[in-house]
Image (cartoon, helix red, strand yellow):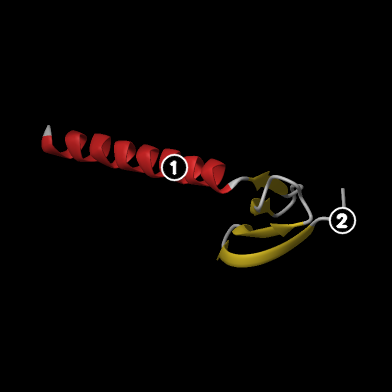
Amino acid sequence: MSEIELTELIAQAYTGNGCKISAGTVEGHPVDTVYLRLEKDGEEATTLLLRPDELAAIAWCASGVLWSVEMQRMDGQEAK
């Protein structure tokens, strides 16, 4: 396998707590073509090399849990 090269295409930094979430393309990997990196001050960064469908599944799950949490929050407000 050749050397893997990551190219960041998007990032969201959180200056108050030293976090950064970024994603981009992967070159030099036979299967995985995108990456997702999670960084937090004082911790080792986590980088996932993924196929596009795997990253889409992560986005779908994250979106679903955020929606569910918001629906629970709204249900709690209406009950009062």
Query: Is 5 located above or below residue 73 in the figure?
Result: below
Relative placement, left or right, of 31 versus 65 is: right
| Amino acid at the residue labelled 2 | Glu
Residue identified by numbered label 2: 3
Residue in view at x 65 percent, y 60 percent: 25
Mark 2 nearby-residue class (10 Å; few <14, some 14–19, many ≥20): few
Q: Quadrant of residue 74?
A: top left
Residue in view at x 70 percent, y 57 percent: 26
Give the spatial CA distance, label 2 vs label 1.
Answer: 31 Å
Q: Nearer the viewer, residue 49 or 15?
A: 49
Q: Earlier in the sequence, mark 2 or mark 1?
A: 2
Residue in view at x 43 percent, y 38 percent: 61
Outermost residue to the right = 2
- Secondary structure at numbered mark 1: helix
* Residue 28 appears anywhere in the view: yes
Residue identified by numbered label 1: 62
